[in-house]
Image (cartoon, rainbow, N blue to C red):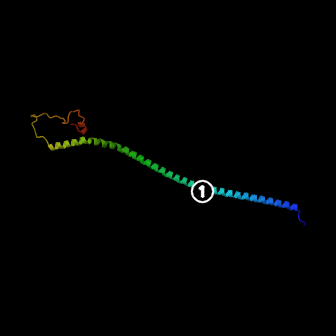
Amino acid sequence: MAAPPALQIREANAHLAAVHRRAAELEGRLDEAERTLRAQAERLARHDQQLRAKDREIAALQEQLLTSEAAVHSLQAAVRQRDELIGQLQPRAQLLQDMCRCRPPLAGLLAALVEAERLGPLPAADPGGPGPPLANSSSRGEEGDSEQLQPEALGTTV
């Protein structure tokens, strides 16, 4: 077998060099593509972790919201119950206020009744005898006096 001509060898060497350069270029591009792919995969993994963390945070916030809503409903029910109780107690409070306003005059009346009992009954007198006629009057003043109690206010009629 004869040796290939020098031109053919040079062309073959040039072709091999070009193939080698192309292979090196493609390997470089492949390495760059692999680095890019790994970087993207890492970014995606971090992003996925962030999304999972956000999902957990959202779930915790939703649970907290449900708990808060339950507490609000419970407090609203308590407020309604207290409002009902206030509604029931207001007439009684008004009655107690009225009773407190009436207390000083009643205390005066009771003191006068105690004094009347202490004085006891009058000695027997002659019905047609001397003395002023007995009349139903008050020692406080006129009949139009606003402090004077009417018999109906005491629950009796005289």
For the residue pair 24 and 145, the one nearer the viewer reads as 24
Q: Quadrant of the C terminus?
A: top left
**Residue at (48, 51) in percent of width and height:** 68
For the residue pair 27 and 69, the one nearer the viewer reads as 27
Residue type at tag 1: Gln
**Where residue 43 sits in the image (x, y, percent)?**
63, 56
Picture quadrant of residue 96: top left
Instruction: Name, please, the residue furthest toward the bottom.
Output: 1
Left or right: 40 with respect to 105?
right
| Location of mark 1 (residue) | 49
**Mark 1 closeness class: few <14, some 14–19, many ≥20 residues within 10 Å:** few
Is residue 146 depicted above or below 120 in this figure?
Answer: above
Q: Quadrant of the N terminus?
A: bottom right
**Residue at (54, 54) in percent of width and height:** 57
**Where residue 78 sits in the image (x, y, percent)?**
42, 48
Left or right: 85 with respect to 43?
left
**Where residue 79 sits in the image (x, y, percent)?**
42, 47
**Where residue 18 sits in the image (x, y, percent)?**
80, 58
**Residue at (68, 58) in percent of width and height:** 35
Left or right: 120 with respect to 156?
left
Left or right: 114 with respect to 31?
left
Is residue 51 depicted above or below 132 in this figure?
Answer: below
Per the image, label 1 sits on a secondary structure element best described as helix
Instruction: Name, please, the residue furthest toward the right.
Output: 2
Picture quadrant of residue 155: top left
**Residue at (35, 43) in percent of width and height:** 90
For the residue pair 28 and 141, the one nearer the viewer reads as 28
